[in-house]
Image: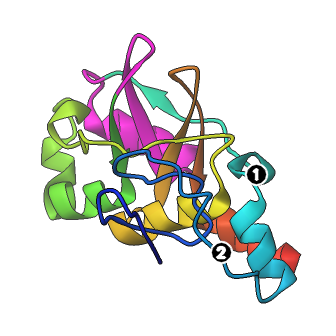
Amino acid sequence: MTLCPDCGYENIDGADECEMCHQPLSALSKRAPASEVERSIVHDRVSRLEVRDPLLVRPDMPVGEVLRRMVEGRRGCAIVVEGTKLVGIFTERDALVKLNVDAARLAPRPVSEFMTRSVETLELDDRIAFALHKMDVGGYRHIPILSEGQVTGVISVRHILDYLTAAL
C-alpha cells in the first residue's frame, strides 16, 4: 500500500493519484512488479477486460420482473437507471439478503425498494489494480462502467479472474 503524503489515505501500489484527495502519487517510489502478471494488473486498464453490456432497468420495475430478466440473461446484477442517470444496482446478493424466501410475495414491489443505492463505478481507463482494490475493499462482485457519465457496461470479479487466467 502507498500512503498519501497529503491525507494519509492508503492507496494501492501503482496508483497515479490518491483515491481520497486526488493528489498525485507518481513522485513516490514504486517497487517494480515482481512478475508479468503483476505488471499487467498494475498497468493495464479496465478496457482490457471483457466488459459486458449492462442489464438496465427502471426503478419502478417490479423486482420479480428484474429477477426474471437476470435469470434469462444469466446476469449477476441489474443496473437501475432513471433516464440515463445511474440510481442503483440490484445484485444476486440483494436478492438473497433482501428478498430471500419472501421473493414470490415481494415480486410485485418496485426494485428501488431493494436495490443498493450507493454504487461504486469505474471508467474504462481506470487501472485493473484499482478495480480489484474497489472490489476487495467494498466486497463488490459487480461494478458498473461509466463513459462520459453514462453506464456503458459492467465488470464482475469473473472478468478479472478470466483476465488473470489468460495472463498466466
Q: Is residue 72 magenta?
A: yes
Q: In front here: 48 or 61?
A: 48
Q: CA distance from mark 1 to mark 2?
A: 28 Å
Name the residue at 70% across, 67% down: 42
Q: Is residue 122 magenta?
A: no
Label 1: few (<14), some or many (≥20) within 10 Å?
A: some
Per the rendered image, the range of residues in magenta is 59-86
Name the residue at 52% across, 49% down: 24
Q: Left or right: 12 with respect to 98? A: right
Label 1's element? Answer: loop
Q: Residue at label 1?
A: 50
Q: Nearer the viewer, mark 1 or mark 2?
A: 2
**Depicted 62 relative to depicted 117: above or below:** above
**Residue flagged by tag 1: what amino acid is it?**
Glu
Name the residue at 63% across, 47% down: 126
Q: Quadrant of residue 82?
A: top left
Q: Is residue 163 visible?
A: no
